[in-house]
Image (spheres, coloured by chain):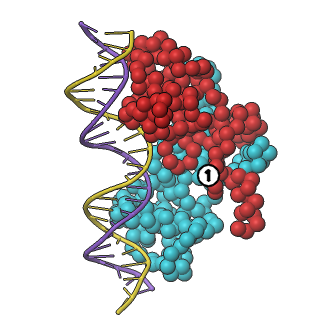
Chain colours: A cyan, B red, C purple, D yellow
DNA sequence: TTAAATGCAAAGCTTTTGCAATACT
DNA sequence: AGTATTGCAAAAGCTTTGCATTTAA
């Protein structure tokens, strides 16, 4: 069975629920998928495929990077996982149920994670200016964070 | 001589002015740099390093991709060139003097280029929501364009 | 003359693909 | 049993680096 197009984000509580979704779609609850899901649930925020392949010291065994990418794609198409591009560097993966949006400082590169409601006014302004329905969960808002902006205007 | 950090965007009228800036910094006005600059002036919008290396049929000879990247970096540090990341795919380069910002549709991938004034309200909203000084000239605003948004809400 | 810049080749990093072997259901 | 999935190896796409040679100043 093949999953053809991306589902809406799914709020999934734990690894077992995620595996149940896979099975419901005729896909398999393999060990490698368990590994990816456990690390995703354990992660504090978006995490790279490389880091997922490394597993968790003691708890989760490492697995093959190519399989990690393939599994992330499947999980993403099911709506269980999504990925985000925070500046340069590799794509980062997170559970799709965590509705979060991102701001990245282009000077100090710190990532700020906010609830979607925080940026409601920004979305409104984008719609007004352009008609676009913006989202900052796949590509972040990039700019100077307050600290770097101040530093810069004081001529440092 | 080495250029260490990025200058403010420079409005440069033509290839000769750009080469003059290079010389003023103790750098050389080489043939390969002329080539990159001519293609940048001829380009309609942001263009990839690969495309710059290809030259222009008949007018501009092709040059080495590694040199193109090196020259783009020098030109960028001088404030003559900037680059933008429009979704996946390679980085795209353009003259820094063209103050433009970008919106990309995450469904049809069309790039919309706007004058910075268009997004003044968005910048205000970002500052209000987060204190960030946003800019959409390096990473674009990503969302659904009006067409794709309509299509999607009609359940296609 | 001499240091900057080039061209070529090789490597680095992220991601994808092919394929025979393996393991879910 | 049958096929989805894995692991490994190789390649693809973008970008950077090393180095001997060329070239602008």
Residue at 43% from the left image edge and 27% from the top image edge: B71
User: Which x, y percent locates residue A146?
Assistant: 63, 33
Is B104 in front, or is C24?
A: B104
> The residue marked by circle 1 belongs to what chain?
B
Q: Secondary structure at mark 1?
A: loop
Residue A69: which quarter of the image? Answer: bottom left
Residue at 80% from the left image edge and 45% from the top image edge: A128
Residue at 55% from the left image edge and 42% from the top image edge: B85
Residue positioned most to the front: B58
User: Which x, y percent locates residue B128?
Assistant: 74, 38
User: Which x, y percent locates residue B100?
Assistant: 66, 33
Residue corresponding to mark 1: B109
User: Is C21 situated left or right of A103 in this image?
Assistant: left
* Vertical position of residue A15 compared to residue A140: above or below: below
| Residue B52 in view, yes or no | no
Residue at 61% from the left image edge and 52% from the top image edge: B109
Is A146 in front, or is C14?
A: C14
* Vertical position of residue B85 compared to residue A144: above or below: below
| Residue A26 in view, yes or no | yes
Which quadrant does the C terminus of chain A fall into?
Answer: top right
């Amino acid at each position: 069975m093949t999953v053809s197009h991306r589902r809406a984000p799914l709020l999934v509580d734990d690894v077992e629920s995620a595996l149940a979704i896979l099975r419901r779609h005729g896909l398999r609850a393999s060990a490698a998928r368990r590994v990816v899901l456990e690390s995703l649930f354990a992660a504090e925020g978006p995490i790279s495929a490389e880091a997922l392949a490394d597993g968790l010291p003691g708890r989760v065994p490492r697995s093959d990077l190519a399989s990690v990418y393939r599994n992330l794609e499947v999980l993403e198409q099911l709506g269980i996982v999504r990925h985000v591009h925070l500046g340069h560097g590799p794509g980062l993966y997170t559970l799709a149920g965590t509705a979060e949006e991102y701001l990245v400082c282009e000077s100090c590169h710190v990532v700020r994670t906010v609830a979607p409601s925080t940026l409601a006014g920004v979305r409104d302004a984008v719609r007004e200016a352009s008609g676009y329905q913006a989202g900052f969960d796949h590509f972040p808002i990039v700019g100077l964070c307050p600290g770097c902006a101040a530093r810069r205007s004081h001529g440092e």
